[in-house]
Image (tube, helix red, strand yellow):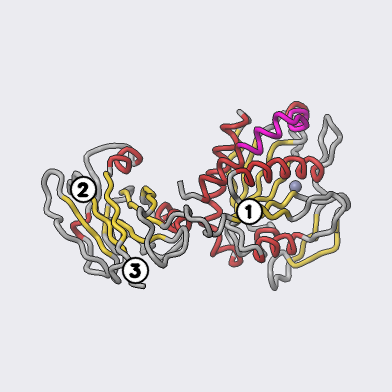
């Protein structure tokens, strides 16, 4: 069947607000002739622009107050056809601001979450910080695949101290499953607390329509970190969330941090999306709990990341070396806040918000 034309009309007001206000919208005037047609790009008040993809399967029209202020120094990446969260990560990495829109009506023959149009076009030259409007295929129809999240509760009852390569083919090795930490006031081990929080997180995500795959639902298992990553790969996870707690010698330190894969050859393909997820989960988890934010951190030394082909994060839910935070994490109410906050961040990532 011939693909129908999906047309999206929108105002760019949101983009302008997101970008911090000011007179500019974007400088599409310098767009190179590429796979898209840009029209009506004269300057002046409220010009309009339209863009159509090369095969004519989708188009976008926009009206913007267009001024030519600012240096033109960023080339807009090509994102049509990519998953929206990957597109968002690419644009953010290029120093651009992103506004996402669902395609209404949905474009024919395009899978859920794929970008169907972008504005400005790929290869347009714009000012740093300029807004790119990303239109993507919604997941609204019955029969669309749900988001898949793999939850890996960290560690296990008996550590597995046999070694495995730290990444595929590596000569450097690491324990298959390290022992984890223990609560200074509760005496509860990390593996048990991690499972409690992970199960609550599962419940929250399932209620939001997410398909959840658990790496483990019992404590007495033996699953090396490489195999945990393989679970996420096999499930084609949209995101792998590893639930951990931390401990440090300074017992006064507390708070949440989120780790993401970074800085080695194995994780290059998932680094940008994982960073995006880490930022959103960290922000939402801190907001939901009121915990101190210990920030996000890129890590090259995590086997669970290095074997993963899917975007992955570790949420360090709190410091078990801090007596009051350890006690707080033992309560159902605080665990629920953690689960709610982490889930909010996950959904923001999955939905490209
Ligand atoms: Zn741990």
Which picture quadrant has residue 35?
A: bottom left
* For discs 3 and 2, the disc positioned in front in the rendered view: 3
Q: Earlier in the sequence, mark 1 or mark 2?
A: 2
Query: Which of the pair 316/171 is nearer the observer?
Result: 316
Q: Residue at x 64, y 46 (%)?
A: 206
Image side of residue 263 versus residue 73, left or right? right
Q: Earlier in the sequence, mark 1 or mark 3?
A: 3
> At numbered mark 3, what does the secondary structure look like: helix, strand or loop?
loop
Q: Which residue is mark 1?
A: 211
CA gap between label 1 and label 2 equals 38 Å
Query: Which of the pair 47/242 is nearer the observer?
Result: 47
Image side of residue 149 versus residue 269, left or right? right
Residue segment shown in magenta: 326-340
Query: Which of the pair 298/289 is nearer the observer?
Result: 289
Is 25 included in the stretch rendered in magenta?
A: no
Query: Which of the pair 207/83 is nearer the observer?
Result: 207
């Amino acid at each position: 069947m011939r693909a129908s034309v999906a047309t999206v009309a929108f105002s760019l007001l949101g983009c302008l607000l997101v970008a911090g206000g000011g007179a500019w919208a974007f400088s599409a005037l310098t767009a190179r002739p590429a796979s898209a047609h840009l029209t009506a790009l004269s300057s002046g008040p409220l010009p309009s622009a339209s863009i159509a993809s090369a095969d004519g399967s989708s188009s976008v029209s926009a009206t913007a107050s267009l001024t030519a202020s600012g240096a033109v120094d960023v080339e807009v990446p090509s994102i049509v056809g990519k998953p929206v969260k990957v597109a968002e990560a690419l644009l953010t990495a290029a120093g651009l601001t992103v506004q996402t829109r669902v395609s209404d009506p949905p474009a024919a023959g395009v899978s859920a979450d794929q970008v169907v149009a972008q504005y400005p076009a790929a290869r347009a030259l714009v000012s740093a910080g300029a807004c790119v409007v990303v239109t993507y295929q919604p997941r609204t129809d019955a029969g669309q695949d749900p988001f898949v999240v793999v939850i890996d509760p960290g560690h296990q009852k008996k550590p597995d101290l046999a070694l495995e390569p730290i990444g595929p083919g590596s000569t450097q090795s690491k324990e298959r499953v390290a022992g984890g930490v223990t609560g200074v006031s509760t005496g509860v081990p990390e593996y048990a607390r991690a499972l409690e929080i992970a199960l609550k997180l599962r419940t929250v995500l399932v209620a939001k329509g997410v398909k959840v795959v658990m790496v483990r639902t019992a404590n007495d298992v033996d699953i090396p970190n490489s195999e945990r990553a393989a679970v996420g790969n096999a499930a084609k996870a949209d995101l792998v969330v590893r639930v951990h707690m931390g401990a440090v010698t300074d017992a006064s330190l507390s708070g949440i941090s989120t780790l993401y894969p970074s800085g080695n050859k194995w994780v290059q393909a998932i680094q940008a999306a994982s960073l995006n997820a880490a930022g959103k989960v960290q922000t939402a988890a801190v907001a939901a709990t009121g915990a101190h934010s210990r920030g996000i951190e890129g890590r090259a030394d995590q086997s669970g990341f290095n074997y993963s082909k899917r975007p992955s994060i570790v949420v360090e839910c709190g410091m078990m070396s801090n007596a009051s935070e350890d006690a707080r994490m033992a309560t159902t109410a605080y665990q629920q806040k953690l689960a709610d906050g982490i889930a909010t961040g996950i959904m923001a990532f999955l939905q490209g918000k």
